Amino acid sequence: MLKGLAIVPPSIGRISIGRVVEKNGKRLPEKDDQFTLTTQVWTREGWMLHPLNEALRKANTGKLRAIPVRFLFNDPDLNLRAEYSAFDRETGRPVCVGNGETCRRAGDNGIEELPCPTPDGCAFGKGGACKPYGRLNVLIGDEDEMGSFLFRTTSYNSIRTLVARLHYFAAVSGNLLACLPLELKLRGKSTTQSYRSAIYYVDLCVRTGSRLEAAITEARELDARRKAAGFDQQALDTAAHAGFSNGAFEESIEDGGAVVDEFYSQGTTGDAPHYSPPSLPVTGGSPPSTLRDKMERKAVQLGGKAA
């Protein structure tokens, strides 16, 4: 195994909410309120759609707001890696990754391990340079049982919800998370930060039409069949742990463009890129008073017009 290279789950596609489009020489996020499955190939029209995208849409009425999934690992933290992260805005390379206690930071002397005071208390990550950043791997369909789809997010709502759900489902199933039939579901909410306009985040639930008890029963049956066939889930989780810890940072050079698009997307705030740009405040609200707030508000409005 090459030292210094994080070995991550093989990815055969991406899950996004919205898309990135090129306008006036800039790559800007375009809002949406549904999932889109793409390949890892970029064209002039954007990311090429994955065949499963159309298949899932045909199986659903209306917009694609739920995706049936399974997970590779029983350990919730292997399926979803969430950290405070700062990236180089030009290359997308990670420069600092921390968990709120310690961080790994790239400097002139190589990778250093330092205290991590979280973005609110860190001088290095001030000005929005450091954000929570999550990567979720899920299995969709039966074509490739080791090939996953990757969902990247900087959304507090998505990260917090997914972390809770993954740990809860692992606990109630007796650590059979990899065998549970679940689904990703898109939910909307309004907050004062979004000026009461809708923002969208990702939740994890039992599949539509089923109940938790039935899902656990199905998970136990699948686990029994796998063990009878010689499938070693614990060994798979152990191998994944070793792969992730083999490198200082998970993102590679090839991921740089996607990271810049999703981490430093222009024209959005809050739960970017899966964020619905806010309209003007409703009656009774007052506009931001600081210069920074006014500039951010203007950028949001321009982003909404461009979408």
Image (cartoon, helix red, strand yellow):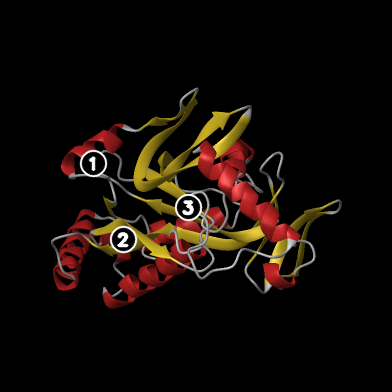
Q: Residue 254, position in %: x, y? A: 60, 36
Secondary structure under tag 3 reads loop
Q: Amino acid at mark 2?
A: Ala
- Judging by the rendered image, the residue that carries numbered circle 3 is 275
Q: Camera-side residue: 80 or 112?
A: 80
Secondary structure under tag 1 reads helix
Q: Are marks 1 and 3 in contact (CB under 8 Å)?
A: no
Q: Residue 9, position in %: x, y? A: 45, 48
Determine which of the numbered discs, if any, sits on residue 56 in the image. Answer: 1
Using the numbered discs, state the Cα–Cα distance from disc 1 to disc 2 in whole angstroms: 21 Å
Determine which of the numbered discs, if any, sits on residue 178 in the image. Answer: 2
Using the numbered discs, state the Cα–Cα distance from disc 1 to disc 3 in whole angstroms: 22 Å
- Please identify the quadrant where the N terminus is shown: top right
Name the mark nearer the viewer: 1 or 2: 1
**Farthest-out residue, front:** 283
Q: Residue 198, position in %: x, y? A: 42, 58
In the picture shown, does residue 287 fall above or below 24? below
Q: Residue at the location (43% across, 47% down)?
A: 150
